[in-house]
Image (cartoon, helix red, strand yellow):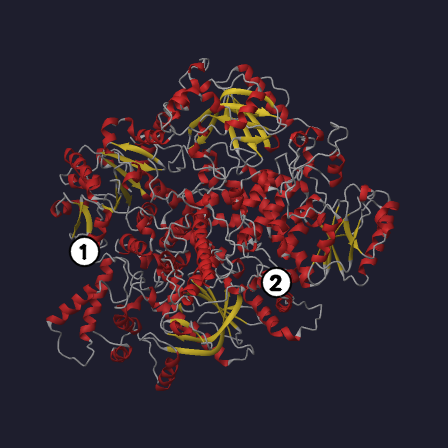
Amino acid sequence: MGGVNYVSRRRAALQPEESDEESWEELVPLPPSCPLAGTAAWSWGGREAPGAMLGKGAGGSGAKPAKPSFVSYVSPEEIHKKEPIEKEVNLHLLPGELLLCEANTVLKCVQEDGSNRGACGKLICTNFKIAFLGDESASDDNEPEFKNKIIGENDITLHCIDHIYGVYDEKKKSLSGQLKKYPEKLIIYCKDLRVFHFCLRYTKEEEVKRIVSGIVHHSQTPKLLKRLFLFSYATAAPTNTDIQNQTVMFDAIKDWREELERTKGNMKYKVLNANEAYKVSEKLPLYFVVPMSLSEESILQYQGRGIPIWCWSCHNGASLLKMSAFPKEQEDNTSQMHKIFLDGIYKTINKPPYEVLKTDDLSSSLPSLQDIQAAYIRFKQLFLIDNSTDFWDTDVKWFSLLESTNWLEIVRRCLKKAIEVAEYLEGQNTNVLLVEENASDLCCVISSLVQVMMDSHYRTKFGFQSLIQKEWVMGGHCFLDRCNHLRQNDKEEAPVFLLFLDCVWQLVQQYPPAFEFTETYLTVLSDSLYIPIFSTFFFNSQHQKDTNMSGEGHRAQSSHFRFLTVWDWSVQFESKAQVLLNNPLYVEKPKLDKSQRKTTRFKHQRQLSLPLTQTKSSPKRGFFREETDHFIKNILGKRISKLINSSDELHNNFTEFYDSWHCKPADFHGLLLPHIDGPGIKVWAQRYLRWIPEAQLLGGGTVATATKILDMIEEVQSLQKKMDEKHSLTVPQGREALPMLRNSARLSSLFPFALLQRHSLKPVLPTSTWKDLEDEDDLAKRDDEFVDLSEVI
Amino acid sequence: MLSGSKNSFKIQQHQPGPALRGPKSSAMNSRRNKNCQAFPCIPGEHVLEAAAHVRKIVCSRDGEGSILGTLYCTNLRVAFVPEPTPGDTVGAPRCSTRLHSEHDVALLCIRRLVAVNSFTKAKVLTASSTLKFIPEELVLYCRDFRVLRFRFRDSGLEPRACQVTLAIVQAQESSSASAGTWYDTGAIRNLENAWLSTEGSSSSSTLLFERPCDWEKELRRLGAAGWRVSPVNERFDMATSLPKYLWVPSRLLDNELKRAFGHFNARRIPRLCWHHPGGSDLLRAAGFHADSDPEKEDVRSVEALMLAGHAQCVIVETAVDLPSPAEIQLSYLKLRALCLPDSSVADEKWLSALEGTRWLEHVRACVRKACEVAALLAERSRSIMLQESDDRDLNCLLASLIQVLSDPHTRTQSGFQSLLQKEWVVAGHPFLQRLNLLRDNDREESPVFLLFLDCVWQLLQQFPASFEFTETYLLALHDSSYIPFFSTFLFNCQWERDRRNQHRASNQIYAPVNGWREPPPLEILQKGGRLAKERGGPYLPTIWDWALRYTTQQRSQFRNPAYARSSGSTTVPNGKSAPLGGDKLEAALSGSGTMYLFAKGALSPQTHLFPWKNGSLSKKGWWRAQSSESLSEQDRSLRSSPSGCPLQPEGLLLPASVGPLIRLWRRCYLRGSQEVQTPCASHCYWVEQHSLADRALAWDSGDLAVVPGSATDSLGHLGVASLPPRSVNSQRNWTCFEGD
């Protein structure tokens, strides 16, 4: 029979010391009360103090199987029989991390094709994460290639926990608050869409109590800001040397000045330092940019409300601005004053040298935060799967389910809004002012999307990171509230940043060569939202960060916490894993000399100012007549029905702009407009499907091509090197080779996230109806007939 | 041998056929000749109308542009010949292909004609309609999802525009009216003549499975030791729809074999499709014939055929989980309506509209079932018989899909083409009916083959490095199914194809070329026959002659640069399967084989070979009763350890068929709407860089012998040799490698 043979083969491939370990199947028949101490493998570290564990944790990773050398008289097997305890204690605690509770003999269930498999181990809850220390994961063969140094395969940070369910007699109940009865199984849904099943049937009762209430308490109850792990980590962590980071943090006035200069906005806009010490507003960053003509008094008048704040300037001088609106006042008097104030402001900016201003109230033209949150909750349900049968049930209705969640529609509307804004800026040379109540949610989404689409600088990795710093971190997006990190108010929760990343992903997958980073980068970034050692996503505003930074007597020795920024990717990934964040197919912007630049700029403008509107007569009109005519015919030919429906002129402009751009070849360093039609918007498969074994393709997926491309790139480089050598030029630095993609011949499509499924190489069959044929057959007879295919082929 | 194009022209003149629609007047004749100089006619084709200075609108990766050229309407097709631009090196080879797939459309492939004028609305044209305005643009909606748009000269007052438009409308109308006599039209006859000369150039390694040696060769490749090629159906006297040669168990003599035919619908007996290196065999057969009597003695041979020497036989009910041809047709029509550029589905309702077509559901069902059967094949040595009531539709699909999953050889271009020949063309898939190429019978239309291509595309996008061919190739294949100039898709079975050829052969003799009036001597007949055999096929070319329609540059895009040839050899040493043979023998002799039925993802044991042996169960409801019984058994079997597949062999692809991973083939179905052009395959840049660096090095180094062999080799693989050199820093390098 196939299974038997397979198991023995696997055994043989494993490390020698594993032969005395029990797999779960063999363990099950044991009565739960059986003292497991008899087996050496189970007796590890039960009562060890956390301190000791920490000490060993440092050395624990070095406990690799000793290679037999000729000096040694003891065989490696013997050595390992003696030190299983040492091997198992590999709980790696971060500085400042405290072990809170733990439970032994917990089964982590892997639900696959209806069969229950699992790994036995220890469940641990610290003030940072929930961790499962399995016995099997120690084998070096399965060392994940793309490993997060902070969060292991079986680690869940407390902030990453979405929901906890307990299973009582086959019934699933949500766990929260005080528990009267303890479940036999714990199901944890994570915000990065992993689902963990921990079976507690074989765990001691008091351990169950402790671990379950511990996990529920530490992950579900509201917290104070100061109790975030961020602070304990920052206190305990060694003061790391500041690594030179190319990401512009926008926390200094210099950064803003340089940004103004880069975008050539410095003619009309100025950096203000009026908010130093947060005199103007706690919502605003220390430094911000406003139109030059704006007076100091008006800025101070309403704590920064009603003030147009500069985001970005287009190459043609049109600028993107944002403004936090006044809250709707009941009193006529106040709202009248607000109106007068705003009129004054508009008058100031409508004067030359500023062009026409177009205001867009995002709170009325885009879905509300509640809508976004509701859509996302529905959407993620599609991917949080308890078992495979559920998945196959939803499968038939996949598209209508997906549509009914409305998430993709929200993505589409955001992209559409961004295109509209781009059309005003680029096509009509109009300034755009985005208005939102706090200018820190949808404003961030739209303004950063517009910048990604229009400015190729923001499509590089450092540029993108700077953009997030500028628009989100400094722009005062309430990460703490929107991610509900403190669990204080569920109503404030909304995945706004994730929505932005999803929009960017749509662009990345439509125009992969235009981006320096990969979708893996975006996925990893979205995961970093829940890792509380980086300060980037754990404050509501710069002011909040600064006021909490000073430590306020919190161990007087250090006056300032030193927070890590998420942009320091080396904290999370080894450099060879970081390679996966960079797009090998990205082509850098060619460096042109001055004269060339002028000509391209001209072309650029010509191309983009094409959609001429009837209302605005342009001197260039005659020049472009041919193309306009062509364009009209174009519409007649194919968009008849769509055009008839929309007589709206505004809509016309948009369609013309959109269509004419898509008629032209895409310049990967110029304006980039996404396809937003029905088939154009897709599901971010890497993020949402990565943990679903049914979606895994062995040897398939884009990884397969990526490997080939990298081979090719390397070959090109070696050829170029040879050419250069021949011409005795200096040898350019080659790209870093990717040993990771090379060494394993067959990667799964879920790479780099899920490992090759260790347990099941069985084909994915839809139902649990895979019938065992061998019931009535003589097993011994069949065994001879079985042919090991791996040997034959 | 016959004849360049000029000779065949003469034949046409001498050969008045009833349906021949030739030019009547000499005036037209002269004009025709004038036009012919510019337009590379297929012999037998003549230009009805032409309009110069027409712009064809192309939406490509390079943006929407237009090509200036001349639009022709001939008696066979609408053709567009671009004007050669000075200094265009690509222009030269283009002329060599006479059928230009990119710009041409066969009249039979046009679905709808729309004339557009900027002042009036678009008008759908039929033969009866009169054109009240001079069209500025002519839009051709093709049956293969293409939309061709031709814009007449900008003034819009081009009298030619009117003429050519009306000519196209009429030609299209009359060609579809007389489609029943398609083969007899003078044009198609001369087409056959003409291709006699060109066909010799095809050096395709595709096995056509028309000669026994192809069958022998393939059987050797599979290493199926217990099987032989039987010529029992060589004269189609056993079954007209079956191929001439069949793979049957070696132990079974033809005499015994003949007794089995009567037990199956349309006498389509179980025969080998593919042999798994691990020992399993994949068979296909029609359903049991209603009148077959299980008590008869010759059931033995049926049993032997099905078990094929294995101890276990699994009957796969093909039709159970898969859509019927009628359902396929229905969802195909819905899909086409949805994908038309003027479909009125709102963007936010697109996904549910897509689901409503059920097309992807059908694709998913096929992929899933093929995956299950492929797993069964790999799991252990057994015989698996695909059974469909007539064995001519979904059996073709399933059998070939299973092989694509299991056999790396079928994922090469020649292997894939051989597979299509074996499982579709010679196996008797009724292409003529299903594709309704001649549009004579709408009721039987059902794009089963296109569904198969979609399934393969799904695999291709799930396993982009496992296929030697690209999406472009599949697209070319897709389009080819609507071109009525090739023998491959023009017949319902091999018998029809051969009969047509015999007919053709006699025609050729009775209408001699060089004024030969005598009755044909025997040698000629034999010679002709032998010639036909030597060339291995019909006179109409097969579609595998890609060179007839695609330029070298286009064909280079058929090759997948990311293809990683699987290292393992696909053949099995004979020694490996020999002991199995002994085992098989025993089982077959004792007759102790067990039968299983596989349906809805579950296997259930069968006690009888013929389900209605006891006479109590009705034939229709039989399997349902069985499977419901097996469902109750499943619970029992579940707790025992699942019999997992052994380590996944190198060659086996196990695709995912979950909702999010079954996608719409956008480059095929959404070609009409320009806005959803897929982004270019991003690796093309490096392919190009690779070739550039390689060439530069080659040019550079007169004496430098450092060009690594591997690099030049892979360059050949990538098929980029024909790309013109461009500057390295040029932004325009981003032309799509796989672009249209």
Instruction: Check the residue under mark 1 and report the chain it is in.
Output: B
Look at the picture and state if A229 lies above or below B576.
above
Q: Nearer the viewer, residue B612 or A249?
A: A249
Look at the picture and state if A263 lies above or below A397.
below
- Tell me, yes or no, whether the two marked residues, 2 and 1, touch with CB atoms within 8 Å: no
Q: Residue at x 71, y 68 (%)?
A: A616
Residue type at numbered disc 2: Ile
Q: Residue at x 24, y 43 (%)?
A: B288
Image check: B664 left or right of A779?
right
Instruction: Check the residue under mark 2 and report the chain it is in.
Output: A
Q: Residue A550: percent from the left, percent from the top?
A: 75, 34
Q: What residue does disc 1 label?
A: B212
Tag in front: 2 or 1: 1
**Alpha-carbon span between mark 2 and mark 1:** 62 Å
Q: Nearer the viewer, residue B639 or B450?
A: B639
Look at the picture and state if B105 lies above or below B220.
below
Q: What residue does disc 2 label?
A: A644
Label 1 sits on a secondary structure element that is helix
Q: Residue A516: percent from the left, percent from the top?
A: 56, 52
| Corner quadrant of residue B486 | bottom left
Q: Nearer the viewer, residue B150 or B463?
A: B463
The number of callouts visible is 2
| Residue at the extreme right of the image, as rendered | A333
